[in-house]
Image (spheres, rainbow, N blue to C red):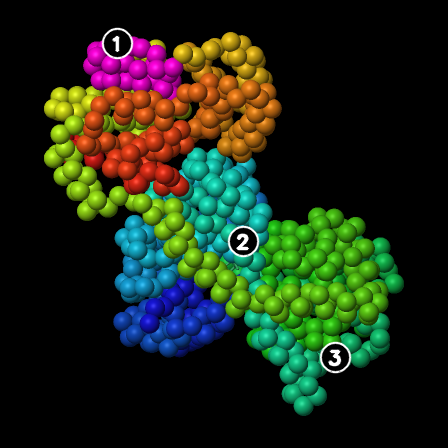
């Protein structure tokens, strides 16, 4: 049976050695807690790090660890101490984590750590590759493994790979500061589907792909080599029933009461106005803990009536404590809690109860169910599941969630009180509002929040991701359905060799040569000349290059050769080295259109006008892709409103808009050539939208080939100019 292989840095269980004995504990953090329920249900395997380094394990301990891990349907990737330092504490948590959370000043760019990151991603790839069986799907998670999708795809192109990022993807302006930005993006593009928590992260990612890799993006689909990579947002949910049921059991009078709950009850029973405000996070600088504490202080000063009544319970779970920023944060938090408690405490009241530890699930439920307000205020957070868990446990529909706008969860939790975590005013007003909110309003808000969380729970989230991932297979089939295979290629070669009278029509840019930033740099090279010469010297073969290029350029490049040429999209033809016009064209319109194009050049850096004899082309290959997209739409609107008499047409080429007379295109030129002789073999190759005119008029027996994997009227598709050259070499 096909299985799903989940891959993440951390396994859902963590192994450590305590007093020479193995200790197994559940992992904290949104990824592990969320995916755990998905994993528990399926027949999959989870590949990840056990929490223990190779150096800590001797052979027998290793066996024991593996047995424990395998029992949980997991498979371990061994990490050395060096790996742990440079890949996990280093590159993952001192470079990527701060950068992706907009803590640019914390980000370190160290080459040794980057090397370790590559090495460890390769280690993960090896374990995944040996686990994959025919038909399996691989689902890679999070920022520690950004290179893994491509490492797997390189070896197993047949395997469907999904990738989900659990943290924000930063804006292009941040991401572009990163020294290894291309490698990271191409690593991720090894996946067939890339998922984010929110549309904003998706948008940022696509923007970086367009600007840094300069790839074509069509809505949310990226054309990458011979594949389509889909990008989408899937806001992660929680195991709603688990939390809701746990809260129901907790509230049942027959259930045993924990020690913690007894302490909580003691405070609450002091009076109706005694309330708890709850805050739970890993101790991470992205969670905005010092800000929250200072804001709480500000609140107590602004609304002194709450003194001796409300209490902030702050649970900070130890995390990445070997990273200096986290150590500093720990000191700062300790100091702030001490100072505020010192300032406000009375003999019978301390404003903050602070726990720095991981608590068992039952105690989390005690805290969630006993707190009137949850104060979840990260300065930046991919999603934040704690906010969702709090809502799920409010079985009586009371309680108020105050949530930071900077958490991904805020996008789908509008009924929470949303605040800017940098504003103390917002904090104080929101806390006062929450503490005095009428029960009816609390109920109304909770009801809506719970409805959504229950419906779109973690299981639904995973199912949706996996079914979209499965659908990407069909996507490849639609767009790359005409990929030329070896059998077809051999057939073409055989037919070509047998034919008595052959016509070979080849587009130039994007077909015989790749694109250059400046069109004048895309000159024919020695290899190409040799290849074209070989065709020219073939018996019974008419070779013709057909291009949108102007006559002057081709004249310059091919002056010393006697190939036939068609230029300006079919205006001029050169046969036996003699130029004749195929069409008689007017040019008066050019003086009206050129000033318009000039205004677009002025407003769009990186663009320029190419003046040809019979057309004007506005090139935008090196412009900012997003600005260019807007400008092309504007220009199209302007031009189509001006060009009303059907004399001119506006062609959208590959990163170029060309305006030329309507009665000329490569299709008309092709038809004229075809009429001149009786061919029994016709080969037409082109990459561009304007080449579709040739494919349209080609006779049924012609071999038409599109370069690139996009929708086409041609019979076959091949990848790029290199492939074109390989095929042409085979023919001669
Ligand atoms: P992050 O992924 O950044 O850690 P989230 O809020 O998305 O933040 O996820 C935190 C997860 O860790 C939640 O599922 C929460 O229940 C769990 N968790 C938080 N605190 C504790 C704790 N003290 N003990 C056990 N699990 C915890
Ligand atoms: C966040 C990350 C996870 C990570 C978790 C705990 O949720 O997105 O990938 O596992 O924090 O961090 P840790 O460094 O302890 O794995």
Position of 725 compared to 569: left or right?
Answer: left
Which residue is denoted by mark 2 in the rendering?
A: 233
- Asked if disc 3 and disc 2 are in contact, CB closer than 8 Å, the reply is no
Farthest right residue in view: 305
Q: Secondary structure at mark 1?
A: strand
Instruction: Give the distance between the C-alpha atoms of the residues marked 3 and 1, in whole angstroms.
Output: 99 Å
Which residue is painted at 24% across and 32% down in the image? 683
Alpha-carbon neighbours of circle 3 within 10 Å: few (<14), some, or many (≥20)?
few
Q: Residue at coordinates 33% horizontally, 57% vertically from top-left?
A: 159
Helix, strand or loop at mark 3 = helix
How far apart are the two marked residues, 3 and 2, measured between alpha carbons? 41 Å
Can the viewer see residue 180 in this picture?
no
Figure check: 408 above or below 502: below
- Choose top left, top right, bottom left or bottom right for residue 452: bottom right
Residue 262 appears left or right of 162 = right
Q: Quadrant of residue 665?
A: top left
Given this view, does label 3 or label 1 mark the residue nearer the observer?
1
**Residue 262 percent location from the top left of the image:** 70, 81
Residue 690 occupies which quadrant of the picture?
Answer: top left
Residue picked out by circle 1: 578
Respond yes or no on whether mark 3 lies under 8 Å from ligand 1: no
**Pointer 1: residues within 10 angstroms few (<14), some, or many (20+)?**
few
Q: Residue at x 69, y 82 (%)?
A: 251
Rounded to the nearest angstrom, the CA distance separating label 2 from label 1 is 58 Å
Q: Which residues are magenta?
A: 558-583
Residue to which mark 3 is pinned: 265
């Amino acid at each position: 049976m096909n299985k799903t292989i989940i891959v993440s840095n951390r396994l859902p269980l963590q192994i450590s050695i305590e007093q020479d004995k193995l200790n197994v504990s559940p992992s904290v953090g949104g990824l592990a807690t969320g995916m755990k329920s998905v994993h528990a249900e399926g027949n999959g395997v989870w590949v990840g790090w056990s929490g223990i380094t190779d150096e800590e394990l001797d052979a027998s301990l290793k066996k024991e660890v593996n047995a424990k891990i395998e029992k949980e349907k997991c498979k371990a990737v061994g990490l050395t101490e060096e790996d742990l330092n440079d890949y996990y504490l280093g590159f993952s948590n001192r470079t990527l984590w701060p950068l992706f959370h907009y803590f640019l000043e914390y980000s370190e760019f160290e080459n040794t750590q980057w090397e370790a990151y590559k090495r460890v991603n390769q280690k993960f790839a090896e374990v995944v590759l040996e686990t994959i069986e025919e038909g399996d799907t691989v689902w890679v998670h999070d920022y520690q493994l950004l290179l893994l999708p491509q490492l797997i795809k390189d070896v197993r192109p047949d395997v469907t790979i999904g990738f989900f990022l659990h943290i924000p993807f930063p804006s292009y302006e941040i991401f572009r500061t990163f020294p290894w930005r291309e490698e990271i993006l191409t690593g991720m593009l090894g996946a067939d589907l890339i998922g984010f928590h929110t549309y904003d992260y998706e948008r940022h990612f696509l923007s970086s792909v367009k600007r840094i890799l300069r790839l074509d993006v069509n809505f949310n689909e990226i054309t990458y080599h011979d594949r389509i990579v889909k990008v989408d947002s899937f806001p992660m949910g929680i195991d709603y029933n688990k939390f809701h049921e746990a809260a129901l059991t907790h509230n049942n009078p027959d259930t045993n009461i924990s020690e913690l709950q007894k302490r909580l009850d003691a405070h609450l029973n002091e009076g109706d106005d005694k309330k708890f405000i709850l805050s739970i996070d890993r101790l991470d600088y992205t969670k905005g803990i010092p800000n929250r504490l200072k804001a709480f202080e500000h609140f107590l000063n602004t609304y002194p009536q709450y003194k001796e009544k409300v209490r902030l319970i702050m649970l900070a779970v130890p995390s990445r404590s070997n990273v200096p920023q986290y150590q500093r944060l720990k000191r700062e938090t300790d100091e702030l809690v001490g100072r505020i408690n010192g300032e406000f405490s009375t003999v019978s009241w301390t404003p903050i109860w602070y726990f720095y530890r991981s608590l068992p699930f039952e105690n989390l439920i005690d805290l969630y169910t006993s707190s009137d307000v949850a104060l979840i205020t990260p300065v930046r957070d991919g999603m934040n599941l704690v906010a969702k868990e709090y809502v799920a446990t409010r079985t009586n529909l009371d309680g108020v969630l105050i949530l930071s706008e900077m958490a991904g969860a805020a996008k789908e939790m509008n009924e929470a009180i949303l605040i800017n975590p940098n504003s103390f005013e917002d904090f104080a007003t929101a806390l006062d509002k929450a503490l005095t909110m009428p029960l009816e309003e609390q109920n109304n808000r909770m009801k809506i929040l719970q409805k959504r969380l229950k419906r779109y729970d973690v299981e639904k989230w995973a199912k949706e991701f996996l079914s979209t991932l499965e659908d990407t297979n069909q996507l490849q089939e639609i767009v790359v359905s005409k990929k030329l295979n070896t059998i077809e290629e051999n057939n073409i070669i055989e037919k070509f060799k047998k034919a008595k009278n052959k016509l070979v029509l080849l587009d130039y840019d994007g077909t015989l040569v790749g694109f250059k930033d400046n069109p004048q740099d895309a000159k024919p090279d020695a290899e190409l000349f040799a290849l074209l010469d070989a065709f020219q010297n073939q018996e019974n073969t008419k070779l013709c290059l057909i291009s949108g290029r102007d006559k002057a350029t081709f004249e310059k490049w091919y002056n010393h050769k006697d190939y036939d040429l068609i230029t300006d999209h079919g205006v001029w033809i050169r046969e036996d080295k003699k130029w004749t016009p195929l069409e008689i064209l007017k040019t008066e319109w050019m003086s009206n259109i050129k000033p318009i194009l000039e205004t677009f050049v002025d407003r769009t850096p990186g663009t320029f006008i190419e003046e040809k004899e019979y057309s004007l082309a506005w090139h935008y290959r090196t412009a900012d892709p997003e600005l260019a997209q807007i400008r092309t739409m504007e220009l199209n609107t302007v031009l189509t409103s001006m060009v009303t008499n059907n004399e001119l047409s506006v062609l959208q080429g590959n990163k170029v808009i060309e305006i030329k007379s309507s009665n000329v295109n490569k299709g008309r030129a092709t038809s004229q050539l075809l009429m001149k002789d009786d061919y029994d073999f016709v080969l037409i190759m082109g990459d561009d939208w304007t080449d579709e005119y040739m494919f349209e008029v080609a006779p049924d027996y012609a071999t038409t080939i599109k370069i690139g994997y996009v929708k086409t009227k041609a019979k076959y598709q091949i990848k790029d100019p290199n492939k074109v050259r390989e095929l042409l070499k085979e023919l001669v």
